[in-house]
Each structure stands twice: as structure tokens, then as C-alpha cells.
Image (spheres, rainbow, N blue to C red):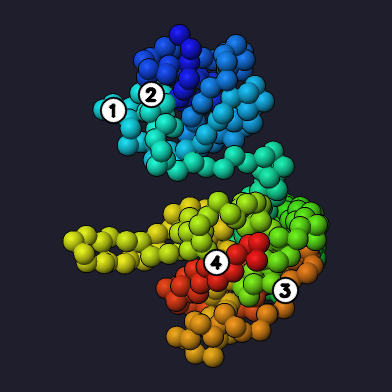
Amino acid sequence: MHITTIGLDIAKNVFQVHGIDAAEKVVVRKQLRRSQVLAFFEALPPCLVGIEACATAHYWPRELTKLGHQVRLMPAKDVKAYVKRNKNDAADAEAICEAVRRPTMRFVQIKSAEQQGRLMLHRTRDLLMRQRTQLINALRAHMAELGIVSAQGREGIKELLKIIASEQDARLPVDAHTSLVVLAAGLQAVQTMIGSIEKRIMAQHRASEASQRLESIPGIGVIGATAIAATVPDPKIFRSGRDLAAWIGIVPRQDSTGGKHKLGPISKQGDRYLRRILVVGAHGIEAGAPAAGEVSSAHTASRPQTVQSGRSGACQQDGAYRLGVAGQGRHLSSACACGSGLIRGRAIGG
């Protein structure tokens, strides 16, 4: 029988295949090891392949497309509705095969290897910044146990690092000084790695016309512009700016029924990294607005100075300055409304 549609449930080592023909009759239902996947699809004529959009999901569509197959990625939460009773690999593959043929199914755009590489820069920088905060907190906590405290911010950290660098300070026992020197060296190493990644991000920004247009939006700087451009390379997949805002998760969550409209807080669905960048940028705009409730006036406010340097000091958080805004506000609800307005107000290609 000629296979027309395949549901492929992927994992690290064990893969499940569920294939049907044009009459929707099950033709193949088998388990494959990782080394057998490409050989199995290479022996098949071109067909439609459905895969859940999860970890490692973008690699397989690229490889199967090279073999002539049409591959579609789907959100896992949308596929879940087609799982019958108990969950297992065979049931998941069958559900994927059923869901990929639905005309109303939403599909995920396949990322290229280059696009994933650009996003890895942001994820790596985010990880290193969390590690930097951990190191700073550890330094402050250990030295506070010995009665040595300093002010908040990077200037306070500089004072602590000077004390650690000085071997003449009698307040630090030998063993404590040894441990603090290791933490200080780790902090310096992490800071150097963050700087090198930020230089690479800056180079991407200068080479991307879309990223430079995004930076012209108030509240979005180099980090935010490059992250949005890498995550959404083709904004035309969205019908409007509001659809993009809903995809990121910065529009109200609905719980409406019987003609009664109930809007709650933001849905917090979608890319958490993009949402955080936009919320922080909206905080900065809100802080510079003439009044707390005048969100619309923030849209027409003058463009704050954007960070153009890849350097950053030893501080706990970059805050809004790394995103090209002047400060941070405190009211999350109105800031999210402002962030949603930023996305809806301008298209990436505008």
C-alpha cells in the first residue's frame, strides 16, 4: 500500500511511526531507533509527515524535507486533543497522524539551523546572566557573614572585589579569602563571556535591516530587536500585530461564555523570553510617561537612548538599560498593555 500520511513521535533514541494510505487505512505502525529513522524515510515515496513541535523537532523536518517529504510541525497542546485514552508512543503517533490532516490545525514554522544559532546566542547570554547573578549573590552573602557589606549595584560589587583582591585585609580569614577569590575569578570569566556574546549579537543587529527597524520602536533596544527578528523571521505568518501579541502572550486571557466577556490577566503563553523583554521595555516607557494612566502618550514619546556598547559592569541585573530604555516602571498590568500596544502598533516589516 502507498503511504500518504505519517505521524512521527520523536524522542531522544526511540521513535514511533504511524502511517496510513489514501483510504485512511493503517499501513505501518512500528518503532524505530534513532539510527533507523532517516533510512526508513529514504525508502518511502514523498508523503505528508506530522511532528509535534518539541525539543529537537526542527532538526528532523529539515532532514526529511531533503528527502522530498512534506513536513509539518504542530503545537503539542493542539495534538493532545486527538490522543485516545491512555498516553503512549503509539497513541501519540496516531494522534499526530490524525491532527496533521485537519484543515483548521495551526502549524509551526520550521526554523533553519542559522536561525536556531542566532537564538542560541540569546539563550546562552540569558544563562550566563543568571550565573553572574548567582555569583554576585554568593559573594555578598559570604562577605556579609564576616561583617562586610556594600551598597547595591555595580559600585557596591566593585568595593567587594577590591577587598577580595587585597591580601592585607585582616577581616578575611585565609580559607574564606581562598573561596572568595575563586568566586571573583568565576565572576570575571562569566562577565568576559557575556561581553563576547553581546559583541556577536551587536554584529547581527548591524547586519539585519529588520532588527534595525525594530530598534526604532520605543522600548526596544538591540537585545530585544535581535531576539524578535530571530524568533519571527517572517511576520507575514500573522494576520495582524494583535495576533503576534497574542502569540507572545501579552494580551488578556479570555474566559467568556454566554455572551458575557471576561478578560483576565495576560495569558503568559508563548515565548517567555520575548515576553519578558517587551514587559521590561514597557516598564521603561511607563516610567517616562507624563502620567501613570497615559499609556497612549508613551507610544509617541521620544526614543530613549539605546545601549550601543557590548560592555557591561559587574552588576546583578542589566535591567532596562540593556534593552535601550531609560528605566523600569512598577505597574505590571498597564506595562503589559503598553507592550501589547507596541507589538500591535508597528509591523516588523513596516
Residue occupying image coordinates x 65% and y 51%: 233
Checking the image for residue 94, the label placed there is 2
Residue indicated by mark 4: 343
**Picture coordinates of residue 201 (x, y %)?**
75, 56
**Picture coordinates of residue 266 (x, y %)?**
40, 64
Closer to us: 202 or 231: 231
Residue indicated by mark 1: 84
In the image, what residue type sits under mark 1?
Answer: Lys
**Picture coordinates of residue 240 (x, y %)?**
51, 61
Label 3 SS? loop
The answer to whether residue 16 of the structure is visible from this angle is no
- Please state which of the two labelled residues, at mark 4 or mark 3, is closer to the viewer: 4
Label 2 SS? helix
Q: Quadrant of residue 160?
A: bottom right
> In this image, 155 relative to 346: left or right?
right
> Label 2 to label 4, Cα distance in Å?
37 Å
In the image, what residue type sits under mark 4?
Answer: Ile
Residue indicated by mark 3: 306
**Which numbered disc, 2 or 3, marks the residue that appears first in the sequence?**
2
- Please state which of the two labelled residues, at mark 2 or mark 3, is closer to the viewer: 2
Residue occupying image coordinates x 78% and y 69%: 308
**Which numbered disc, 2 or 4, marks the residue that appears first in the sequence?**
2
> Label 1 to label 4, Cα distance in Å?
38 Å
Label 4 SS? helix
Q: Is residue 198 above or below residue 344?
A: above
**Which numbered disc, 1 or 4, marks the residue that appears first in the sequence?**
1
- Please state which of the two labelled residues, at mark 1 or mark 3, is closer to the viewer: 1
Label 2: few (<14), some (14–19) or many (≥20) C-alpha neighbours in 10 Å: many
> In this image, 111 relative to 167: left or right?
left
> Label 1 to label 3, Cα distance in Å?
52 Å
> Label 4 to label 3, Cα distance in Å?
18 Å
Q: Quadrant of residue 174?
A: bottom right
